Structure formats: C-alpha cells, structure tokens
Image: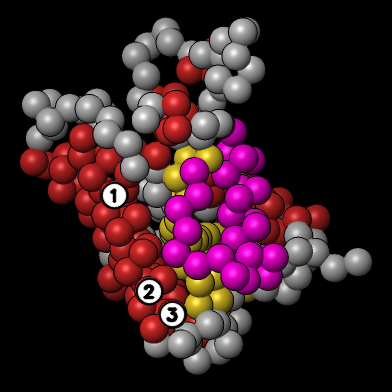
Amino acid sequence: MTGRVQDKIALVTGGASGIGRAIVQALVGEGARVLISDLNADAGQALADQLNEQRGGAASFVRHDAASEADWNAVAELVRERYGRLDVLVNNAGILLKGSIEETSLEDWHKLLRVNADSAFLGCRMAVALMKDSGGGSIINVSSIAALAGRDDYAAYGASKGAVAALNRAVAAHCRRQKYRIRCNSLHPDGVLTPMTVASYPPGIDPAKFTIDSDPMNRMCLPEDVASAALYLASDESRAINGMELRIDSGQFVMSI
C-alpha cells in the first residue's frame, strides 16, 4: 500500500521544529522524500537522521536562511541536482513578535516582513520556476489567522502574514492563468502550541491550559493539526484546490465576526 504522497519530493522551510517539524514527519510518514530547510543545523540534521533510521533516504537537511535570495538560489540548485524536480514546497519559516501599533518599532516591522514575507516570496518564485517544467506541484504557504482577523497586539506580525496571504492568491491566479499545473494554497492557524508561541506569553502563563471545560473546542491547535492540513494540500486528494485559505482555528475566526 502506497502513502498519500508516495515518492513526492518536498521542501519544508523552518522544518526543524514546531509546525515545520510536524509537517516533515507527516510527509515522510506518507511516503514523501523531504528536504528539511532550517537555520538550526543541529536540530535539522538530528531530525533527518531520526527519519532516515525509520526509512532510508526519507529525509535530508540543508542549512538555509529562507529570507536570503542567495540561499534560495543554492537550495534550488541542490534540488535540481539531487532530485531533478520539486513536487511540494511548504513555506513555513517564520518568526513571531508581539506588539501593538504603538509598541512596534520600525526595526521589528522590517524584521517580521523580511523573515515572514520575503521568505514566502522567494520560495514561491523558486518553486514556480522548478515546477512549471516538471509536471507541476503544490505550494503551501503557512500564514496565520492574524492575516484575516485584526489582532491589535500583533500588528506587524499580522501584516507580515497578510502579505503572505495576498502573495498566495497572486501566485495561484498567475499559475492558473499561465496554465501551469501548480496549485498554491495557504494555511491560517491560530494559537498553535509550539515553543515559539509559548515564548510569546508572559512568564508563568501556560497557553496549553487555556482550555475551558464547558467548551471543548476552545483549545490551542497542535502542530499535528496544521500538518494534517498540509498533508492534504500536498497530496493529489486536493488536486482541485487552488488559491484557498484554510483556517485551522477550531472556529475562532467565525466566532469573532
């Protein structure tokens, strides 16, 4: 029995921890060969080694600044030489900085846009170039619910993820108009329980304990929740899905309308 993404070649940025790590594990678990991209070489290589113990050749690691054009050029060349094609790109690399419009510095604004938005732009551009001549593929951009709903305490972060969402729509429309067999969709999680999210809360507050007994839907999403959605979009099961914004938030967005 083959997996849902059997023998697909996937690149996951920010793949060494948190959401990215869960996506890497889900893709490998369903038969993909995954190139893990991250700045954390120790964690990235350790994950690749662990996955290769389970299935030889399932994963490899490359140290990669996803906001660097030079690094993207090097990664593109690596993909061409090692695999010959790219079937799936998950633009997951990102950072989280909290702050209202009055609290956010221009330096933090630029930092968030560089890491979150520039990385998605460079990744999409590279993926389209690789995929259009090799049968197509699936681009998955990890945005945020903050891109769709106003979050006063995450002004710059929400703007950076809003840029990712707008880029996603533009890339999906471009590929459709050009008749490329490339799909481009975005994921919009809210409050995912990762080390990065936990670090954004004040000391002594455990976001994992925010569940309300009378409302079992009111819980933080887990990295595996996002990974399940990414796996669907990476697979041929979603072949008719293009330009979609998939919310992973237990209904939090609709409750805020």
Circle 1 sits on which residue?
Answer: 162
Residue 8 located left or right of residue 109 = right
Q: Quadrant of residue 219?
A: top right
Region in magenta = 221-247
Give percent across and percent down for residue 241.
56, 65
SS type, badge 2: helix
Query: Which residue sits at x=43%, y=10%?
Result: 205
Marks counted in the figure total 3
Amino acid residing under circle 2: Ala
SS type, badge 1: helix
Amino acid residing under circle 1: Gly
What is the crowding at mark 1: few (fewer than 14 residues within 10 Å), some, or many (at least 20)? many
What is the crowding at mark 3: few (fewer than 14 residues within 10 Å), some, or many (at least 20)? some
**Contact (CB < 8 A) between labels 3 and 2?**
yes
Circle 2 sits on which residue?
Answer: 173
**Contact (CB < 8 A) between labels 3 and 1?**
no
Upstream in sequence: badge 3 or badge 1: 1
Query: Which residue sits at x=34%, y=42%?
Result: 148
What is the crowding at mark 2: few (fewer than 14 residues within 10 Å), some, or many (at least 20)? some
Residue 253 located left or right of residue 23 = left
* Residue 230 counted in the magenta span: yes
Circle 3 sits on which residue?
Answer: 176
